[in-house]
Image (cartoon, rainbow, N blue to C red):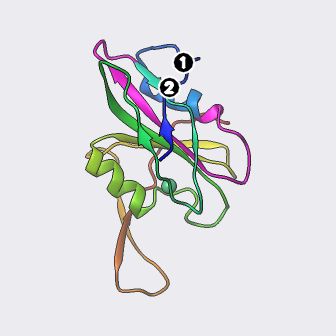
Amino acid sequence: MIAAILDAGCVWQPDMDRAAVTALASVPNSNDEYAGAIYRDAQGRYCYSTPVRGADDTFSFRVVLPTGTVLAGLYHTHLGDDGLAPLFSAGDVRQADRLGAASYILVRSRGIVLRYVPGRTGTMPIHRNGSLRTLTVSRGENLGVSL
Ligand SMILES: [Zn+2]
């Protein structure tokens, strides 16, 4: 399985949002989706992994944690411009909640970065295609940057 490893160019600093935005700004602008990890060290500083390429809206990679760090967040890109692109999907929300880690998405068609923080960012139920099944998604919080 592909590994997300610490980006050699990352400078450890205290702002997690900044780490995520810097990581997302480094993602190749292509028709593939990319994802990666945000690390926190014992001094409360953040850095990011290199981006890993996904396929068909799913990602499968393992996160290599540098010594003395924990997983603080994940980042990935959303392609397309349908109504779901600017939302954290049910899978995104579930994953962040399960890991207890923040999640960041770059909505490529709009050039915006959104943040989801478990237990803090609001969620909403949606029904897909008339299905009775409810999915829990999130609009996230717009970081107000433009990429
Ligand atoms: Zn997603």
Up-down relation of residue 56 to residue 45 (above or below): below
Identify residue for label 1: 10
Identify residue for label 2: 19
For this view, does 71 lie left or right of residue 12?
Answer: left
Residue 85 seen anywhere in this rendered image of the structure: yes
Look at 27% across and 42% down and name the residue there: 100
Look at 57% across and 52% down and name the residue there: 54
Nearest the eye: 134 or 55:
55
For marks 1 and 2 on the same chain, the one whose residue lies earlier in the sequence: 1
Residue 122 seen anywhere in this rendered image of the structure: no
Nearest the eye: 32 or 92:
32
For this view, does 24 lie left or right of residue 141?
Answer: right
Nearest the eye: 61 or 108:
61
Most extreme residue toward the right is 30
- Helix, strand or loop at label 1? It is loop
Q: Amino acid at mark 2?
A: Ala
For this view, does 96 lie left or right of residue 147?
Answer: left
Measured in 3D between alpha carbons, the distance from the residue under mark 1 to the one under mark 2, in whole angstroms, is 8 Å
Number of the front mark, 1 or 2: 1
What x and y, as percent, mark residue 121?
A: 34, 47
- Helix, strand or loop at label 2? It is helix
Q: Is residue 78 magenta?
A: no
What x and y, as percent, mark residue 79?
A: 65, 56
Look at 73% across and 43% down and name the residue there: 29
**Magenta region, residue range:** 24-45
Q: Amino acid at mark 1?
A: Cys
